[in-house]
Image (cartoon, grey):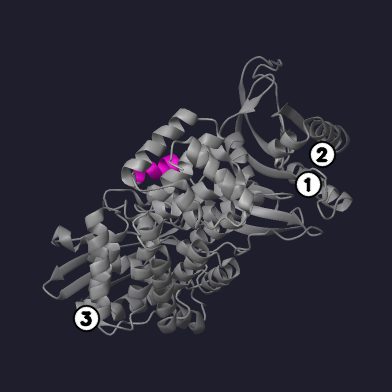
Amino acid sequence: MIRVDNSSPDGDSDQSRPTRRIAATVFTDVVGYSRLMGSDEVGTHKRWMLLRADVLEPRVASFRGHVIKSTGDGLLLEFGDPVDAISFALDTQHHLAEISPDGGDALQLRMSANVGDIIAESDDIYGDGVNIAARLQEFAGPGGIVISGAIHDQVKDHLRYQAADLGFLTLKNIERRIRAFKIAHQGLRPPTVSVAHALKPSVAVLPLQMLGLDPKDAYLSQGIIHDIVASLAGIRELFVVSSTSTLGFNDPAIDPATVCHRLGVRYLVTGTLTRHGEQLRLRVQLIDVDTRSMLWTNQYEASIAQLFDVQGNIATSIAYALLPHIHISELKHAERKIPQSMNAYDLVLQGMYRLYRLGHDDMIAARVLFERALQYDPQYAAAYALMAKWYILHIGEGHSTDFKADSEEALRLAARALEFEPSDPVALAIFGHINSFLFGAYDRALDAFDRAIWGTPNSAIAWSLSASTYCYLGDGPRAVARASYGISLSPLDPYAYFYQSALTNAHYTNETFDDAVHWGTKVMAAAPRFAANLRLLAASLVAAGSIQRAREVGATHMRIDPSFSVEKYCTWYPIKQPDRLALLAERLIEAGLPR
């Protein structure tokens, strides 16, 4: 149990001098407070004051906590004991659920908690421990509680609650990723985001170091680790960081412990790749960074034509090294279909390498490469799925001159991929996104995403693209949680802008506009020609009151897509609620985009 000690080293109390201590902090605020104030300012303020006086403050005191300060529509609380902090949160949310079981007109709260180092002054606390608690709050949703892994570890053996593991989340202005759990009292509804409950062995596959390879063969190394990860991702007992997230760690001098800390994993797969003509030599090893021991190593020599067999052997060996008792059925589930032509496979790898660069020449080249792959192998599901994804970007970036025909072609290609690979998570995710993004078929989309995530829980693209569908439906909290989990599976992807833009949209939908601006700006820095992101960023800046900056972003957008018009865009953009779509249009116009 952690106790708070405000005394100075010499025994005298000194409230004016900042002191450091370990404490549990809780943030609580009212869901949708700005909207409620806009419709009934006096009534909303009165209800909030009564809730504070009658429910919150007495409970804080009864659980030996302190109200540090009011944040207008919320409170920052400190507790000396983490068990008291979580007990307060559970008890309060349980009480509010009992007095208004259907939500009704009652104010709904969201809460977050963390335990860690804080700096205390006479009337405030701040520091890393407080910042983490504050950033976790956005993932809670109405009636929800999100806690850090640090506080979960301290209280899980003392309290009874259900916990959904949200994985390692990327939080604004927090350098490392933070593990988080969404919790509920046993008497409350379970969390809305259902992820694995148990802690899983976590693994990342680093880029193979190319020894004596031509730089133009970089796509080959990336493709190998991509497919090893794709095999591992189908194994439910593993938390697997996506292959593209690790591409930045290609310096052999980087300390493995640093890599694991950045990626939030315990195990690393590293290796080298040498090519002599059509012959490849791969040396791969599995490292437990916690114990600094090598669990397994092996060397493979094969022709390019044998590449899939080699990757399957590597994936199986890693799985057994990590999980000695894994069922053979799980390994079978992780197997991937081998294309009939290695030429097709090679062309798809090169097409993937160019798809996300968004340059005009790269987009044309990517399409040609995918089409050539299908000529070599007309049953290659990955090529169909990536062609469908090409159409998503083609339409979303404003390049299409025939929306209806291009949308139908995207759907045809995605459906064709599923004919050959019905359970492939990438094909399912793309099929789902096309249904919601281009056709407004939300239920059909969600069914596809559920199938993708059920079969491959570590599919970053399925989690991230499903967030967009929840944006179109207006479910901001769920969209933020899903997009954040998707990024946690792919935190350092050099082309992560496609997924991160889903988090921009999620925060825009959630009306957490400062965070939407943060992610939109981040995406703009990585992909300045990504027009879909620029639209969301411009609207978020207007909503946040930064009109001049919004107009600068709007001007950038129009230089990239000069034929854009708000009216044309809103005839197909799939926000379900007409009033929300109309508001988006107003904000885009205010940002300087033409009507």
Q: Nearer the viewer, residue 585 or 322?
A: 585
Q: Element at badge 2?
A: loop
Q: In the rendered structure, which disc, 2 or 3, sits on the residue that comes first in sequence? A: 2
Q: Is residue 488 visible?
A: yes
Q: Are dots 2 and 3 in contact, CB under 8 Å?
A: no
Numbered range of the magenta stretch:
520-526
Label 1 – label 3 distance at C-alpha: 59 Å
Q: Is residue 185 magenta?
A: no
Q: Taking 553 as reference, is 254 left or right?
A: left
Q: Which mark is residue 87?
A: 1
Q: Are dots 2 and 1 in contact, CB under 8 Å?
A: yes
Q: Quadrant of residue 35?
A: top right
Q: Nearer the viewer, residue 12 or 392?
A: 392
Mark 2 or 3: the one toward you: 3
- As shown in the figure, which amino acid type bears the numbered disc 3? Ala
Q: Is residue 374 above or below residue 16?
A: below
- At which x and y percent is residue 577? 63, 54
Q: Quadrant of residue 321?
A: bottom left
Q: In the rendered structure, which disc, 1 or 3, sits on the residue that comes first in sequence? A: 1
Q: Which mark is residue 305?
A: 3
